[in-house]
């Protein structure tokens, strides 16, 4: 998902429908950790999680800053962001 050396801010959808925001330098490993119960206290009891959104950054600081911004969004704003990214990806043939 992310290239080596890239940091990501991401959103996962939990089994109960809630959204969790985080950051990582290994997106695939982090999602696996969430799904094995080792990712975060919040997601441990809400498994499985599904990756629904991510952005890549070249530095940890940028990813942390974006994570903080994502956490301040309302649920509706997060859902709109996810939907826009989905439409963007579909438009590019991905």
Image (tube, rainbow, N blue to C red):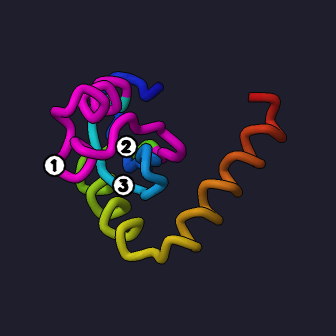
Graded by Cα atoms within 10 Å as few (under 14), some (14 to 19) or many (20 or more), the crowding at tag 1 reads few
Q: In the picture shown, does residue 50 fall above or below 36?
A: below
Q: How many marks are shown on the rendered structure?
A: 3
The magenta stretch is: 28-55
Spatial CA span between label 2 and label 3 = 14 Å
Mark 3 residue element: strand
In screen coordinates, is 79 left or right of 88? Answer: left
Indicate the quadrant containing the C terminus: top left, top right, bottom left or bottom right.
top right
Mark 2 and mark 3 in contact? Answer it, CB < 8 Å: no
Q: Residues within 10 Å of mark 2 (few under 14, many from 20)?
A: many
Residue 8: image tag: 2
Q: Which mark is residue 41?
A: 1
Which residue is found at the position 31% from the left and 30% from the top?
Answer: 35
Can you identify the residue that label 3 sits on? 20
Q: Residue at x 27, y 40 (%)?
A: 24
Element assignment for label 2: strand
Picture residue at 33% right of the left edge, 60% below the top: 67
Residue placed most toward the observer, 52 or 26: 52
Q: What x and y, as percent, mark residue 82? A: 61, 55
Residue 12 rendering spot, x and y as whole percentages? 43, 46
**Spot occupied by residue 89 in the image (x, y as percentages of width and height):** 72, 39
Residue found 19% across the figure and 45% down from its top: 40
The answer to whether residue 66 is magenta is: no
């Amino acid at each position: 998902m992310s290239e080596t050396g890239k940091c990501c801010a991401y959103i996962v959808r939990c089994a109960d429908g809630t959204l969790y925001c985080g950051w990582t330098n290994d997106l695939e490993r982090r999602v696996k950790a969430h799904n094995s119960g080792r990712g975060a206290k919040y997601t441990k009891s809400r498994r499985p999680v599904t990756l629904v959104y991510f952005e890549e950054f070249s530095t940890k600081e940028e990813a942390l800053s974006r994570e903080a911004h994502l956490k301040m969004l309302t649920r509706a704003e997060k859902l709109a962001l996810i939907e826009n990214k989905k439409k963007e990806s579909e438009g590019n043939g991905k």
